[in-house]
Amino acid sequence: MTQPEQAATAFDALHTRHAAALMQQAYLLTGRPWLARRAVERGFWLAWQRWPEVAVDPDPAGWVRAAVYEYALTPWHRLCPGLRTARGPRNPSAAGPSSAGHTSAGHTSAGASDGALAAALLRLPAPHRRALLLHDRVGLGLDTTAAEIEASVPATAGRLRHARERIAALLPQLGLDGQPPERQGEILRARLSALPGPPQVPPPVTGDVRSGSERSAQRITRTAFGATWLFVLVTLVTIAVTPDHYVPQPERPQAGVPHSRMPTDRERGADERQRGADERERRREVREQRDAAREEGNSAREEGNAAVRKKIRQARLAPEIR
């Protein structure tokens, strides 16, 4: 058997052993059958694309499980109504074991109880739901659970405690109140393991998973090459149409703003000399006007004084004339 055949055989065995259980876990995480199938399919796609890494991993099933959980709880699913976490399990009537024409009262009550437990799980926050499933459904230890959800051990223990308290408050018939943590884990493990998978949605076929993974890898590769060539083409076109030298843009005068030119030093000196000459001429005219006014005043006083002296002389000679 060649190495590719050995890899395909080992992958098929991994898928056969764990696909159904991962479908049930993904369904409990999301409450949507087709989203659970899609998450399992994507997880095994990644595992086949990275099979050399997965094959030497100490826990290949844990590697796939982490990929399935990550896709099932991806935050961007909230942007698409069809991929959001459901408020309750789909087809709750199919949550319990039943057969056509032979549904008993015990089966009906068990199915209703299973549906209530699945609905209570979906009411938990996603981190609490994941920690509870890993610890009480898969059976991982507290340290292993903390490592898989990438949280500290105290934080993981706190999530488990809050999740159990919430389920005990929602489903008092489970008898979780007053029980020690070990007993609560045993009760939940038994009940969660008995929950069925998504109704009417079988897990993906092994051969289809490998072929789908290969097609997905080819599409990603082609998309990457196409984007690279498009970037190179755009770069070449930009280089071809861009001039190889600087072409200055013609200056456009701004509307409403007069064009002004800075005067030269010679022009500024001539303006200053002209202003000095104008100032001297103005002062000379003022001085001349002041002198003319003074001369007029002096001549008027002299004329007045002469008239006064004349009258005085006439007054002195008047008696002699008489």
Image: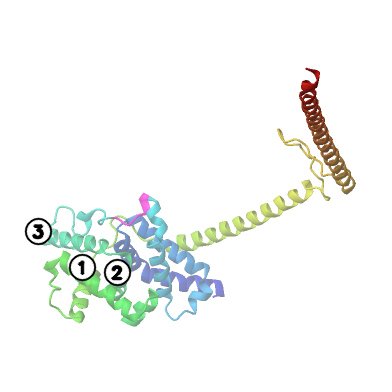
Span colored in magenta: 81-86
Amino acid residing under circle 1: Arg
**Mark 3 or 1, closer to the camera:** 1
What's the distance in space between the residues labelled 3 and 1, CA to CA? 28 Å
Vertical arrangement, residue 115 with respect to residue 264, above or below: below
Amino acid residing under circle 2: His
The disc label shown at residue 195, or none: none
Q: Nearer the viewer, residue 205 or 264?
A: 264
The residue at the point 36 percent across, 79 percent down is 152
Q: Which residue is mark 1?
A: 166
Q: From where the camera sits, is residue 16 visible? A: yes
Q: Residue furthest top?
A: 322
What's the distance in space between the residues labelled 1 and 2, CA to CA? 10 Å
- Tell me residue 231's x, y (percent): 67, 54
Q: Residues within 10 Å of mark 2 (few under 14, many from 20)?
A: many
Q: Which residue is mark 2?
A: 128
Q: From where the camera sits, is residue 140 visible? A: no
The residue at the point 23 percent across, 65 percent down is 195
- Tell me residue 296's x, y (percent): 81, 30
314 in magenta: no
Q: Nearer the viewer, residue 100 or 93?
A: 93
Q: Which residue is mark 3?
A: 105
**Mark 2 or 3, closer to the camera:** 2
Rendered image quadrant of residue 167: bottom left
Amino acid residing under circle 3: Ala
